[in-house]
């Protein structure tokens, strides 16, 4: 048997999740991950890890960019991203991956398509937009909190608004560093300028599945599940 044959297993599920800051991308990504046994790539997590792990030119520059809410240069994102995706391709029990909050520029979308085509995954790729308004996004971000102990994020909607301690570990809740109103407004501008064209691009190419994000976590999850089945 040719060695490559082991990589031609079941059709993988490649899911890209996009949406305004605070729309619940991360939460929905985790739910899909658990449901289908998928791997996960979150650009935000990867970048924050890099800032923490390294103490060099790139990490300090990166920290400043993240603090401002600006987009990180494409080559940096991709150097991290490609290493991950290549490792996934070579995993024998790979079921798929959920990609949280990337691509964030048209250039990244094109590069990602190249990469997905290279790994024979493009035809299995779905792009989900969790749609919330700019106003909702602003409210959710400026009032979101974080657990001091487990670093869990406590969103600002539904029953989460009333929590006084972390619902996972009982830790103290503090304001997130990137929730400064000025920075949030800037992130929303960046969304309109850079990420909206990416969404329009996926809309035109027929990959985009739009779900209403102004509902409970469970309802949004249900819509995504239904959409994934319909489009399969
Ligand atoms: Zn906690």
Image (cartoon, rainbow, N blue to C red):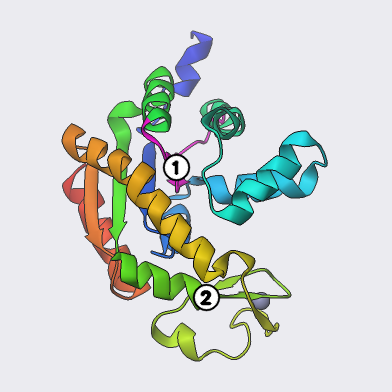
Residue to which mark 2 is pinned: 144
Question: Is 106 left, or right, of 26 in this rendering?
Answer: left
| Residue 86 vertical placement versus 184 (above, below) | above
- Local crowd size for mark 1, using a 10 Å CA cut-off: few (<14), some (14–19), many (≥20): many
**Residue 99, quarter of picture:** top left
Q: Nearer the viewer, residue 58 or 92?
A: 58
54 sits left or right of 222 in the view: right
Please say if 6 is above or below 43: above
Q: Quadrant of residue 224?
A: bottom left
Disc 1 designates what residue?
Answer: 102
Q: In what element is the residue under mark 2?
A: loop
Q: Give the prevailing secondary structure in the magenta stretch.
A: loop
Residue 20 placed where, x, y %? 37, 58
How far is mark 1 from mark 2, CA to CA? 22 Å
| Residue 99 highlighted magenta (yes or no) | yes
Label 1 vs 2, first from the N-terminus: 1
Pointer 2 local density, CA inside 10 Å: few below 14, some 14–19, many at least 20: many
Q: Residue at x 20, y 32 (%)?
A: 205
| Residue 44 x %, y % | 57, 50
Q: Is mark 2 within 8 Å of ligand 1?
A: no
Whether residue 18 is visible to the viewer of this picture, yes or no, is: no
Question: Is there any visible trace of residue 107 in the rendered image?
Answer: yes
Question: Could you tell me if the residues under marks 1 and 2 are in contact, i.e. CB atoms within 8 Å?
Answer: no
Magenta stretch containing residue 224, yes or no? Answer: no
Q: Residue at x 52, y 31 (%)?
A: 74
| Residue at the extreme top | 2
Quadrant of the frame with the C terminus: top left
Q: Which residues are magenta?
A: 91-106
């Amino acid at each position: 048997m040719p060695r490559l044959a082991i990589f031609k297993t079941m059709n993988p599920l490649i899911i890209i999740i996009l949406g305004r800051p605070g729309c619940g991308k991360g939460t929905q990504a985790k739910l899909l991950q658990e449901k289908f046994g998928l791997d996960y790539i979150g650009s935000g997590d990867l970048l924050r890890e890099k800032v923490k792990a390294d103490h060099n030119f790139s990490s300090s520059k990166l920290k400043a960019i993240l603090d401002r809410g600006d987009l990180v240069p494409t080559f940096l994102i991709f150097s991290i991203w490609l290493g991950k995706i290549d490792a996934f391709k070579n995993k024998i029990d790979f079921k798929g991956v959920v990609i949280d909050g990337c691509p964030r520029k048209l250039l990244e979308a094109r590069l990602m398509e190249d990469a997905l085509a290279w790994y024979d995954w493009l035809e299995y790729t779905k792009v989900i937009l969790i749609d919330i308004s700019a106003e909702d996004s602003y409210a959710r971000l400026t009032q979101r909190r974080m657990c001091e102990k487990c670093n869990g994020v406590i969103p600002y909607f539904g029953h989460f608004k009333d929590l006084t301690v972390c619902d996972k570990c009982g830790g103290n809740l503090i304001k997130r560093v990137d929730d400064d109103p000025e920075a949030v407004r800037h992130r929303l501008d960046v969304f309109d300028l850079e990420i909206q064209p990416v969404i329009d691009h996926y809309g035109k190419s027929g990959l985009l599945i739009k779900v209403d994000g102004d509902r409970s976590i469970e309802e949004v999850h249900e819509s995504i599940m239904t959409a994934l089945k319909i489009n399969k």
